[in-house]
Image (tube, rainbow, N blue to C red):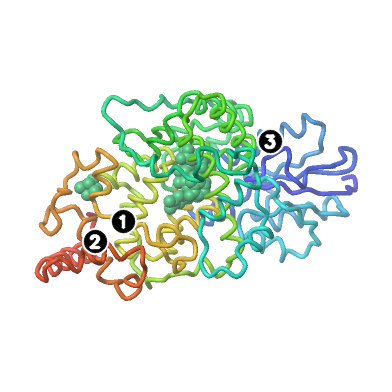
Amino acid sequence: MNKRHRLCLVLGDQLSFDLASLQKLDAQCDTVLLVEVMEEASHVPHHPQKIALIFSAMRHFAKALQEQGLQVEYVTLDDPQNSGSVASELRRWQQLLQAEEVHVTECGDWRLEQALKDCGLAIHWHADTRFVCSRAEFGTWAQGKKQLRMEFFYREMRRKSGLLLNGDGSPVGGAWNFDAENRKALPKGVKAPYPVHFSNDAITCDVLALVRARFNHHYGALDDFDYPVTHADAQALWAYFLDYGLAGFGDYQDAMASDEPFLFHARISAALNIGLLDLRQLCSDVEAAYWAHRIPLNAAEGFIRQLIGWREYVRGVYWLKMPDYADGNLFGNSRLLPEFYWTGDTRMNCMGQAIGQSLKHAYAHHIQRLMVTGNFALLAGIAPSQICEWYLAIYMDAFDWVELPNTLGMVMHADGGYLGSKPYCASGQYIKRMSDYCRNCAYKVSESTTDDACPFNSLYWHFLMRHGDLLRSNQRMSMVYKNLDRMTEPKQQALWERGQKLLAKLDAGESL
Ligand code: FAD
Ligand code: SF4
C-alpha cells in the first residue's frame, strides 16, 4: 500500500459531509476509514433495525465520499481481517497505510472516546461542530451552578442562534416557551399524517441479510425496516414532516393514541443523530415555516426548543459529568428490569402499546418514553443501569450522549436532580388524560387498591411514600405530598400493600 499522509476515521454516527475532521482532506494522499465492528454492534443488544440503519448509512456514505473523489477504506463486519473494535482497526490501518497523522472528530460515547484516547496513537481531535454548543461552552455556562435548568440554557441558545427573536432580541410572541399550549390529548376525528416509507436498495438489502444472520438473537423486528439511509432520503422524510406533521406537532406533542406510533412527531432523531440531517438547517426551516404563516408559534417554538434546548442540554450534561454520571442512583434502586420490557408481554395496555411499537419500529415518541415506560421504571424502582441499557438497546436513535441523561437524569432522577428539578412521576390518571390506552386495558384506571386496579396508581403513591425522605423537601413536590398527607391512614395502608404486592410479583419474575 502507498504511504498516506492523513488517516481520517469516521464513526457510524458521524456521517456528515461537513464533519470537522473531513474538511481539507487531500484526495491524493489522505484516506478516510469506516469500520463495522462487533464491539459497537453488540456492547448492548441493539435493536436489529438500528444496526441495519447504521451499517447501511455508513456504506452509502462511504460510496458518496468515493464519488467525491476521496480515498476510502471500508471494513465490513464479515471481513476476515476485521479485528472487532474501532480502536484496534484504527491501529491496524494506521500501520498498514503508514499514516503520518490520524484525525478523529469527538465521539458521541464516552466509552469509545476513552478507548481511542488509550489506543496508543497520537490522534488529532476535532470538535463536533454539528452542535450549536461546544462541550467547553456548556462547561462555562454550567460553572458554579449546583443544579442546571434547561429553560435558562435554552434562552442562551435562542440568543446565540438568533432563532425566533424580534429585532430587539426579545422572543417572538412575548415569551420564550409556549409549552403550556402543547399538552392537548388527540381529539376524535384528528388524524395523524400517514407515515412516509422508504424502499430498500441493494446496499440495504445486503445489510439486512447480514444483520438477520448475525443478530437474530437481539430483541426487535427487522421486517419493518423502512428508515432513510441516505442524506437525500432523510431530506425527504424531513420535507414530508414540514408539510404534514409540523403544524400539529405543538398541540399534540404530548398525546398518545393506540396503534398510532408516530402521531405528529418527525421521526428524524435517528437520521439527525447519525449525521444525515443538519441541525441548523432543521431549525431555520422551522423558523421559515413560521414566518411564512404555515405553522403556529407553539409548534415552531416547541420544535426548536427540543433541538437547541433539550438535545444540546443533555449532550452538555453528559460530557460535563461523565464518567461518574452513569453511576448515579439517588434512590438506591436494585430491582431487575422485568422481562416484559423485552417482549411486550404485559396486560398493561399503555406498556404493551409503547413496548410493542418499540420492538416493531425501534421507535417511541418522547411522552411514551418518559411517562409510560420510563414512569413505570421509576415507580417500580428499577436499577438505573438496567433501564438505561434497555433504552440504549431498543431505540433507533439511542446513543450514549443523548440516551443516558434522558433516562438516568430525566426519567429516573438518579442524578439527584442535576438535570431536572423533580421526578416526572405520575399515576394512571396522566396516561388516561393523554391517551385512549386505558379504554382497552385489563386494569381499571379508576381503581387504586383492588386486584384489577391500574398498577401505576398504587405504585405512584408507593414511590412517594418510600422516598419521602428525599423528595418532601423539594418545593415542586409539595402539592403531591399535601395530597398524600390528606389521605386517611387506612387508604395509605391499602395503597402501600397493593404496591408491595405488585413489586413482589415483579421480584418473582411475573408479568403485570
Ligand atoms: P420529535 O418529537 O419530532 O422531536 C424533534 C426532535 O427533537 C427529535 O428528533 C430530537 O432530535 C429532539 N428531541 C426532542 N426531545 C429530546 C430530548 N429529550 N433529548 C434530546 N433530543 C430531543 N432522543 C434521542 O435522539 N436518542 C435517545 O437515545 C433518546 N433517549 C430518550 C430516552 C428517554 C427515557 C426519553 C424520555 C427521551 C429520549 N430521547 C432520545 C428524546 C426523544 O424521546 C426522542 O428524541 C424523540 O422521541 C425522537 O423522535 P422524533 O424524531 O419523532 O422526535
Ligand atoms: Fe396503563 Fe393503567 Fe391505563 Fe392500563 S389502566 S392503560 S395500566 S394507565
Image coords of residue 297 (percent x, y): 48, 34
Q: Residue at x 34, y 70 (%)?
A: 471
Q: Looking at the image, which is closer to me, 73 or 105?
A: 105
- Find residue 120 and report its horizontal and vertical position in percent: 77, 65
Give left or right: position of 354 versus 223: left
Residue wearing tag 1: 376
Which quadrant would residue 169 be assigned to in this image? top right
302 over 101 or under it: above or below: above
In three-dimensional space, the C-alpha distance between marks 1 and 2, rounded to whole angstroms, equals 8 Å
SS for callout 2: helix
Quadrant containing the C terminus is: bottom left
| Label 3, residues with CA under 10 Å away: few <14, some 14-19, many ≥20 | many
Residue designated by label 2: 459
Q: Are marks 3 and 2 in contact (CB under 8 Å)?
A: no
Q: Which residue is mark 3?
A: 61
Q: Disc 2 residue type?
A: Leu
Taking the image as drawn, is residue 396 in sight? no
Q: Tell me whether the residue at label 1 lies in contact with that at label 2, contact meaning CB atoms closer than 8 angstroms.
A: yes
Query: Height in image: 458 above or below 274?
Result: below
